[in-house]
Image (tube, rainbow, N blue to C red):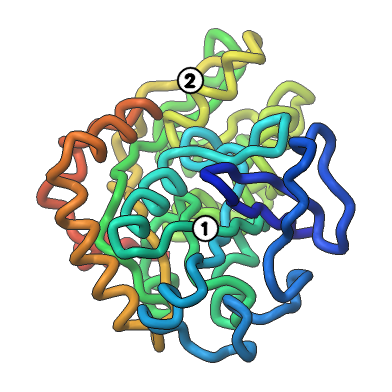
Amino acid sequence: MAHIISQRTRRLTAVIVGGAFLAGVLAGCTTTSPGGGGGGSAGGGASGVGKTVAQAKKDGYLRVAIANEPPYTQVNADGTVTGAEPDVLHAVLKTMDIPEIEGVTTPYESMIPGLNAGRWDVVAAGLFMKQSRCAAVAYSEPVIVSTESFGVPVGNPKNITTVKNVLDNKDLKIAVLSGGFEEGILKTAKVPSNQQVLVKDARSGMEAVTAKRADAFLLPTLSLNDLVKSDKSIEVTKPIEDAPKTGSGAAFRKEDKELRDEYNKALAKFKETPEFAKILEKWGFDPEAVKGVTSEELCKNEG
């Protein structure tokens, strides 16, 4: 089920589609996104209709699909949402005179279909670029570049450090987010489906390892580093040498090329400011890593 995240007065608050509030929602913030539930239109227009810069400025917001996977996106216990991706998106849009964002938390496999169905205007959730996704949406230039690691039991008893290790040992089972970039890594490497344990979210991936349903959880290094803070039975391997370079940016509908192009111009300027580096460093990313990396390069990733 998708969850609406509405920002008002620089505050993002989560509510369940249909009107029921998440536990701990800030009192007094009762606005929900225009159009109601997940089957509604993008930004209040007819479903499937593209969003222009002029319309976004008039509306004063964009609706954005997010996940809850720190450090890319994070929905806090009080309902507020933050993270590297929405923080950068919000900052850039403000420079474009689009002051607000409304978020909808949704599974990764639903992000692109929902975008193209007009349920939101943009995705900002660490949705890593690869060929199939780049064929379906118009990505901005990269905001972050990331490495992949395995979350394994302490001591890494099965010595899982590379994708090749998984291919060489048919008994290994690896947890991956359903529809996530990491599922694509295993598919591209021709890891058999019976060695893949599909999970719905990051916490489920950790639980699959602790419950011994999986031998490792494949996820971005920084995401795993955040998760193991609350689970000392799992450790994070060094970045995987034979995993592809990954990165993400905002994803727009193909027909919203004008909006994407204007966002790219504003993003390029924002990357030159101290605020961009401050946001990335806050969430553990190296702002230097994205320099010189293009969406064209990252869109060549198989999968």
Instruction: Please name the amino acid that badge 2 sits on.
Output: Val
Asked whether 10 or 181 is in front, the reply is 10
Q: Is residue 230 left or right of residue 125?
A: right
Instruction: Please name the amino acid that badge 1 sits on.
Output: Ile
State the SS at label 1: strand
- Write the residue at 70% across / 57% down: 4
Quadrant of the image for the N terminus?
Answer: bottom right
Q: Is residue 37 visible?
A: yes
Asked whether 114 or 164 is in front, the reply is 114
Q: Which residue is mark 2?
A: 236
State the SS at label 2: strand
- In the rendered view, tell whether residue 104 sits above or below residue 58: above
Q: Which residue is mark 1?
A: 101
Q: Is residue 107 left or right of residue 135?
A: right
Quadrant of the image for the C terminus?
Answer: bottom left
Nearer the observer: mark 1 or 2; the answer is 1
